[in-house]
Image (cartoon, grey):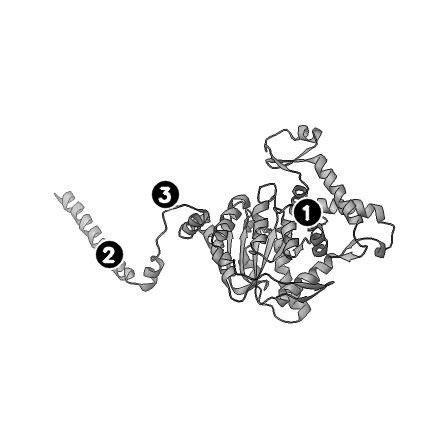
Amino acid sequence: MSEEFSGNSKKIDGWQEYKEKDKVSLAVQKNPERKQLLSKQINQLDLEKVNSVKDLVDNFKGMSIQARNIGTCAEIMEEMLADGDRPTIFLGLSGALIAGGLRKVISDMVKNNLVDVIVSTGAVLYQDFYQGLGHKHYKGDSNTDDLLLRDLLIDRIYDTYVDEIKFDQTDHEIADWLETLEPKDYSSRELLYLLGKQIKDEESILYQASKNNVPVFSPALCDSSIGIGYTIYYSRHKDEPLNKRVTLDMIRDNYEVLQIVDKSKKTGAIYVGGGTPKNWINDAVVMASYVRKREIDGHFYIFQITTDVPHWGGLSGSTLKEAQSWGKIYKKATKQMVFVEASVALPLIVGSVIQKPELYKDRSRLNLKWNWNELESIY
């Protein structure tokens, strides 16, 4: 009997404890901050109601994890395009984007006036030019015998194959094209504009950029097959004086890009991958501040697609928040990173925006007027 009573006593004590907690719980439930934090439900994706990329990405905005991050990136892009101050939008490109099948996605961004300045690795631009000559990328196998590929003169980019013979031809075509240029000092922007004029393929990034007066910079142009073609040219003319050959002035690139930042009312940036293009677009803010001797706010809008992560300490994974400590991104910038491979994320983000033509159909193009290395006007 005493044991039963003891058990009942414990149950009663437990009930009293629960009641006390319940009083606290009721008080907390009235907290307005709690109500605010629990005010937005997660959207449960209903694929039966999704009829377009736009529908899918708009639904992503109410979901979680990387789906929400993709939705937020699309939202930032929409805000950049809708901003009445007409921000200058920089596009940074790195990674196996052409091998991954994104060539037309990127050229459509230029064609539809979604970006104003491109900063790219040389490899992306080389492979764009390579395809512009009619050469192709082919489906491959990441587990193939690479020594066999070597014997067959086939190069592998993860699960994509390219023709080494055609690469060799393209390198030499670039060298031969340089022979046709006036011997003088060039920035990468000027060279790439002229290279784009050699392409007749409307799906080419360089073609659309040259056609629409969108400057393309490649601050690491030497680290690419364009650089290899240039080296072939250089080997032919290395003993000639500078004024008798085509020279590439990479510091002139710095001076040219800082002028774009300086003359823009606002700037925004889209980073596909990271590396040199990301750092260089961010550094353009610092360069403009130093050279113009005035405080530049930094990029107002910015998002990055990457598969790298911050804790390795590398540039491609470094957070956009970290860049604020350097003054490269505006203190109150709208920013987001999405940790998804670019061949998946970029078509979703760009596709959703392209399906909203009201955002960009009336957006004016920049009208950059250059006098050699001086940018006279931008609007």
What residue do we see at 58% from left, 53% from top? 111
Residue placed under numbered mark 1 in the picture: 199
Does 148 sit above or below residue 249? above
Foreground: disc 3 or disc 2: 3
Compute the Cα span from label 3 to label 1. 43 Å
The 10 Å Cα crowd at callout 1, few under 14, some 14 to 19, many 20 or more, is many
Compute the Cα span from label 3 to label 2. 41 Å
Amino acid carrying mark 1 in the image = Ile
Q: Secondary structure at mark 2?
A: helix
Across and down, in percent, residue 366 comes to 61, 62
Q: Which of marks 2 and 3 precedes in the sequence? A: 2
Q: Is residue 159 visible?
A: yes
Amino acid carrying mark 3 in the image = Glu
User: How many marks overall?
Assistant: 3
Q: Residue furthest bottom?
A: 294
Foreground: disc 2 or disc 1: 1
For the residue pair 15 and 51, the one nearer the viewer reads as: 51
Which numbered dot is residue 22? 2
Amino acid carrying mark 2 in the image = Asp
Residue placed under numbered mark 3 in the picture: 48
Across and down, in percent, residue 334 comes to 50, 61
Which quadrant of the figure has residue 142? Answer: top right
